[in-house]
Image: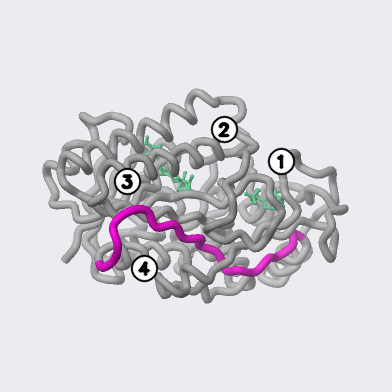
Amino acid sequence: MSTVLVTGGTGFIGSHTVIALDKSGFDVVIADNLSNSKTEVLKRLHTICGKDFRFYKADCCKREELEPVFRENKIDAVIHFAGLKAVGESVSKPLEYYSNNINSLLTLVGLMKDYKVDELVFSSSATVYGESEDVPFTEESPLGMCTNPYGWTKWMQEQMLRDFSKAYPEFKIALLRYFNPVGAHESGLLGEDPRGIPNNLFPYISKVAGGTLEKLTIFGGDYDTEDGTCLRDYIHVMDLAEGHVKAINYLATNDTGINVFNLGTGKGTSVLEAVRAFEKACGHEINKEIGPRRPGDIAVSYASTEKAEKLLGFKATRTVEEMCSSCWNWQTKNPDGLPDDN
Ligand code: NAD
Ligand code: UDP
């Protein structure tokens, strides 16, 4: 049985990926510093998977905290989710973002080199395509100028891994560029649990639907799209999780070097369409108004999914309706999110 280290494994995408890995027969070790997640996630993973996962409370930037994971386990591959990800916060706290995201990758890859663990799946983002409006984005689309420090950290992490791969060609690296991950596990036990007021569309709609927030502001109704609102490629987090399993399997049997894959559905959904789908899922209207555009937003973003389909055998299957109903199930079962650690 192969053992996969999942850094950031108690976070949103990481925890869902742990479920998918476990279901596919992988042995999973989790490392997370809990800066944006809670130990309750481990209890819920136990309920869903019927087992405890080995967990290290470790800051990936600190070699002395991460090294025991490599020393005490025979790791075959790593999925690196750990990182800070809030776009707005990255503008006000750029040093924290550069320091955390860059140093965690450097420390991790240094340990992988020393312990001869040579398969890495890295969480990148469609944000690296910058402000281009030449859609769909293919893996060959030029990388753009990012609009915030968070985006630049992804851009730089990708570049660091490309340089690393040249010097250590025996490494197998998958850069997965996620589009817009949303939704929750079907059990309603796990989902996205942002601290404070959410910035992203689906968590925000969920809170308005659940009555915790008063009104959704739709950022711009005058874009050059059919209904005037922005189009995004929303992908169900469980589809995304399964994409990681495909990437791990691909690395085990394929080429060394850098392999880049978009993970999306290939379909754009407008903000208004997303709101309508959510209204259907929750059974009532969502209080909303059209407001001004949000700086830095592009009108349309969706993935070309051809490469992932052809090489990974990955195709997202869950619909926007399923994304909304799983979010709503999660929201109603956990109106205040997960309980805090004591
Ligand atoms: P998340 O915040 O829910 O999960 C990240 C986890 O990493 C958290 O549990 C946090 O505690 C942990 N972490 C942060 N810094 C750490 C460190 N130095 N050491 C150990 N643990 C640390 O975020 P997510 O939505 O699950 O995102 C996972 C990854 O995917 C991130 O790298 C993110 O940038 C990337 N990504 C996310 C999205 C999205 O929309 N959610 C889109 C594209 C890319
Ligand atoms: N959006 C919105 N209101 C909100 C949050 C987001 O209208 O309160 C829009 C945003 O302008 C974008 C889409 O929803 O067009 C998705 O935004 P999100 O922040 O979830 O993801 P992004 O694509 O920006 O990474």
Is residue 108 highlighted in magenta?
no
Magenta-drawn segment = 253-271
* Mark 4 secondary-structure assignment: helix
Q: Is residue 123 left or right of residue 118?
A: right
* Neighbourhood count class around disc 4 (C-alpha, 10 Å): few under 14, some 14–19, many 20 upward: some
Discs 4, 1 touching: Cβ within 8 Å: no
Check disc 4 and report the residue beneath it. Answer: 246
Q: CA distance from mark 3 to mark 4?
A: 21 Å
Check disc 1 and report the residue beneath it. Answer: 296
Check disc 3 and report the residue beneath it. Answer: 165
* Mark 1 secondary-structure assignment: loop
The tag earlier along the polypeptide, 3 or 1, is 3
The residue type indicated by label 3 comes to Ser
The residue type indicated by label 2 comes to Pro
The residue type indicated by label 1 comes to Gly
State which quarter of the image contains the C terminus. top left
> What residue is shown at x 58% (from left), y 66% (from top)?
304
Check disc 2 and report the residue beneath it. Answer: 149
Q: Is residue 65 visible?
A: yes
Q: CA distance from mark 2 to mark 3?
A: 24 Å
Is residue 262 highlighted in magenta?
yes
> What residue is shown at x 60% (from left), y 74% (from top)?
319
The percent position of residue 314, horizontal first and vertical second, equals 44, 72
